[in-house]
Image: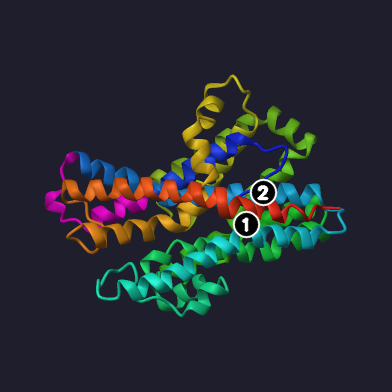
Amino acid sequence: MSEPNSKRIIQLDGLRGIAVLFVVFFHYFNNAYANTAKTSLNAVETTIQKITYWGWAGVDLFFILSGFLIASILLQNRGSKTYFSTFYIRRFSRIVPIYYLLLILFVIAQQVFSDAQSKLFARPFHIGWYISFLQNLQMSMEGYFGAYALAPTWSLAVEEQFYLVIPWIIYFLKDKRVLVFCLLCILLAPVYRTFSDNWYRSYTHLFARIDAPCYGVLLALLSRNKDWITWLKKNWWAFAGLLMAVLFSFFFLHVKALNHSIISLAFMALVFVALRLQQKHFMYRFLTIPFLLKMGKYSYFIYLYHLVINGILFICFSKHINPNLGEFQGYLVTTCSFLLTWFLAAVSFAYFEGRIIQWSHRFPYK
């Protein structure tokens, strides 16, 4: 979901590709195995289920990348006369058209497949919640994700709400005060999660997840401050020790309210390393392989549409109305869903998304 620019950091596209693969594998395998009788899972499938369980963490990586890229653009153009107008025009053009198209297709598909009794279209919220990017608030009040086809859009609501705040923080505050703001958010987010009255509030609210994009903003601040980078180089052992400590607490102490904070800190370290990679480094070469770059390029469409495409194919071509991997047919349908999602993402970017993005760049920062 990044802004195209002449100085594109392509290894971050690779990380974005990894993030969307995390999410897709989580939904296509872990969730599908949950619909499959446990007695029919063999040892390999059970292992895949355990591994893909961690796919939900891909959203935290998305948040950090988004926070970093958006903050980098805003910090660079802080003195622009068109600071706010250009930012919001470009964000609107990148996010809203393809998202509203999904909502239109959802309403149509809901009518077409009304007799299927699939959880894909069951128990949706009023469309107004989705149009206004407030579905995450409704999710916390109702205690469920709404229609399964639109469940991933909670994170889009979090990002949009963050975009309403962060441009003003960066515009009116100096770097050190932006730093303080981010640190406060990072400290308070796990407190908010701890005292949330239900799991959905602790998972989908902006205040519950604001630490991840704020880690991205911190990284943007760090990247433009040579003194901070010099200090970090000299005291790398302190950061490494902190990272080891939080990872230890994640795997052994099981403090649930800190899970997202810990994972986000680890991903922040990963992004920091990726930013400083030399082109000859094996990790740089891995992150820039064509497959991951394409996944990163098409990640927004894939993230929004992969569930609805998979669900409809299962309704049409499987005896199961919900994704199920109890037999070979389920794997075949899932594979076709991934390939179709990829194909449609490429078409969308070439003839719809890409052209809208190109149009939005007629509004430069001046």
User: In the picture, residue 43 is in which quadrant?
Assistant: top left
Which of the pair 189/328 is nearer the observer? Answer: 328
Magenta span of residues: 26-43
User: In the picture, residue 107 is in which quadrant?
Assistant: bottom left
Mark 1 packing: few (<14 Cα in 10 Å), some, or many (20+)? Answer: many
Q: Residue furthest left?
A: 39
Q: Amino acid at mark 2?
A: Glu
**Mark 2 lies on residue:** 3
Which of the pair 26/190 is nearer the observer? Answer: 26
Most common SS among magenta residues: helix
Answer whether labels 1 and 2 touch (C-beta < 8 Å): yes
Q: Residue at x 71, y 51 (%)?
A: 71
In the displayed structure, 156 sits above or below 10; it is below
- Can residue 208 be seen here? The reply is no
Q: Amino acid at mark 1?
A: Arg
**Mark 1 lies on residue:** 94
